[in-house]
Amino acid sequence: MAAKSNGKLFIISAPSGAGKTTLCREALKRFKDITYSISYTTRKPRNGEQDGIDYYFITKEKFKRKIENNKWAEWAEVYGNFYGTSAEFLDTSLASGKHILLDIDVQGAIQIKNRYPDSVTIFIVPPSLETLRARLESRGTDTRQVIERRLEAAKKEMGEKNLYRHVIINDQLSRAVYELIEIIKSYR
Ligand code: 5GP
């Protein structure tokens, strides 16, 4: 059973390349009292990513042990890697009244929503699949095969956006940031 909470949980999901990282960063700059939930992952760090800032990078063995010991508030396998959110971190933060921002995929969002029904769910949509492809290619961090896989996943995820309370179309960054800030403000 999840702890009774005072803090608010904001869940942001998006196909990769939709501009979610930038939007999350802008929201965190604007709201100093919102804490970013650092996920755990078994994937390798990308260039410039730091352990304990972008993710906690852990081994598959460690991740699986935490599944067995019920340490995850949610977890999912995405593109062959595991990603998870610490239950202890969420429960202690919320119980102490902290607001939390989660950047997780659709599978994770559904699990969090079941466990914490008051969570605010926000989905970021890229303007088009062509734009998404262009963004993923210009990022230069993924192989062609990974990009194709991410685009396939994006198509599927786009169909799941109706599960979210709020949908933001990121066709123009400044407007998308404004919308995100207004949504968060309305809950505080
Ligand atoms: P990336 O590898 O590009 O950082 O993330 C891939 C996907 O995993 C993104 O859709 C991201 O939102 C999702 N993700 C990141 N952390 C978590 C997590 O803790 N749980 C779940 N379920 N998904 C996550």
Image (cartoon, helix red, strand yellow):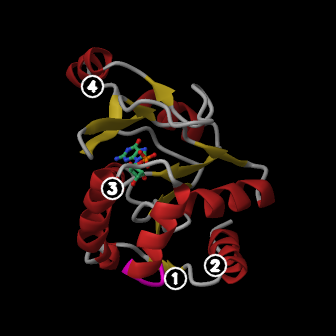
Question: How many C-alpha atoms fall within 10 Å of the one at disc 4: few (<14), some, or many (≥20)?
Answer: few
Tell me the distance, in whole angstroms, between the alpha carbons under discs 2 and 3.
Answer: 28 Å
Chain-order first, disc 1 or disc 3:
3
Provide the secondary structure element on which disc 3 rests.
Answer: helix
* Cβ–Cβ under 8 Å for marks 4 and 1: no
Q: Earlier in the sequence, mark 1 or mark 2?
A: 1
Residue 164 position within the rendered picture, expressed as x and y whole percent measured from the top left: 38, 73
Eye-nearest disc, 2 or 3 = 3
CA gap, disc 1 to disc 2? 7 Å
* Three-letter code, disc 3: Arg
Residue range corresponding to the magenta coloring: 125-129
Task: Tell me which label, 4 or 1, sits earlier in the chain.
Answer: 4
| Res 125 seen here | no
Confirm if mark 1 falls within 8 A of ligand 1.
no
Residue position marked by numbered label 2 in the rendering: 176
Tell me: 113 left or right of 69: right
Residue at (23, 21) in percent of width and height = 64
SS state under label 4: loop
Q: Main secondary structure of the magenta part?
A: loop
Residue 18 is situated, as x and y percent measured from the top left of the image, at 49, 68
Q: Give the crowd class for mark 2: few <14, some 14-19, many >=20 residues within 10 Å.
A: some
Q: Residue at x 27, y 43 (%)?
A: 76
The residue indicated by pointer 4 is 70
Residue type marked 1? Ile
Image x and y of residue 168, in percent: 52, 79
- How far, Cα to Cα, is label 4 from label 1? 35 Å
Number of labels in the image equals 4
Does residue 155 appear left or right of residue 58 in this picture?
Answer: left
Q: CA distance from mark 4 to mark 2?
A: 36 Å
Quarter of the image where the C terminus is located: bottom right
